[in-house]
Image (spheres, rainbow, N blue to C red):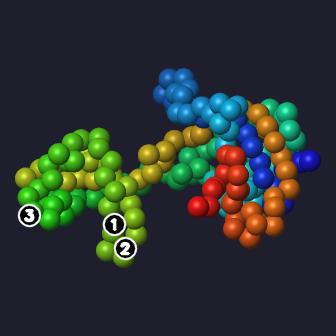
Amino acid sequence: MTIDGKKVVSVSYTLYTPSKITGEDTLVEKTEAESPLVWLYGTGSMIPGFEQNLQGKKVGDLFDFVILAADGYGLYDETYVANVPLDAFRGKDGNIESSILKIGNTIPMQDNNGNHLQGVVKEVSLTDVKMDFNHPMAGKDLHFTGSVLEVRTPSEEELAHGHVHGPGGHHHH
């Protein structure tokens, strides 16, 4: 069975980010065969370049491809770096929650429209906190290597829900 249409796909992979300066790859994440990535192919849940590079592959096939930053998590965008007033970090007691305002910390936040964002603390001043709301992988090319472990037809329930159930997938309680 080949990867196309809507199939449940299971892969093990290693993700690197190539350095444009040194040419060296930096390991980002590696799955093990016992805990593979399992998803419903063709539903838009993965970055498009990932699925495009796996189309037509079968169980046992190896893959090795690079997705450029613009086609992955996007280019790094300076407009996603913002100064947030220090007052936004006041707790219920009215005090600034200084324990979370450490450079490099990721803080879950909401914008004015109620959208959830993840911001990384870049600088803290007496009045503002400089936050970076770019995806952590923005601006980075993605180098994937790995193998296809399983390809199967999804159940009617998986198709209806738009995700995989059972081992490696989503569980309803």
Residue type beneath disc 2: Gly
Ranked by sequence position, the earlier of labels 1 and 3 is 3
Q: Which class describes the residues within 10 Å of circle 3: few (<14), some (14-19), or many (20+)?
A: few
Q: Secondary structure at mark 1?
A: strand
Residue found at the far right of this picture:
1
Identify the image quadrant of the C terminus: bottom right
Residue type beneath disc 3: Gly
Residue 15 picture quarter = top right
Q: CA distance from mark 1 to mark 3?
A: 19 Å
Q: Which residue is mark 2?
A: 114
Q: Which class describes the residues within 10 Å of circle 2: few (<14), some (14-19), or many (20+)?
A: few
Task: Please count the marks in the image.
Answer: 3
Q: What residue is at 75 percent from the left and 55 percent from the top?
A: 41
Q: Position of residue 153 (x, y in %)?
A: 86, 56
Q: Secondary structure at mark 3?
A: loop
Q: Is residue 7 visible?
A: yes
Q: CA distance from mark 1 to mark 2?
A: 5 Å
Q: What residue is at 79 percent from the left and 38 percent from the top?
A: 148
Q: CA distance from mark 2 to mark 3?
A: 22 Å
The answer to whether marks 1 and 2 mark residues whose Cβ atoms lie closer than 8 Å is yes
Q: Which residue is mark 3?
A: 94
| Left or right: 90 as drawn, with respect to 162 | left
Q: Which residue is mark 1?
A: 110
| Left or right: 122 as drawn, with respect to 42 | left
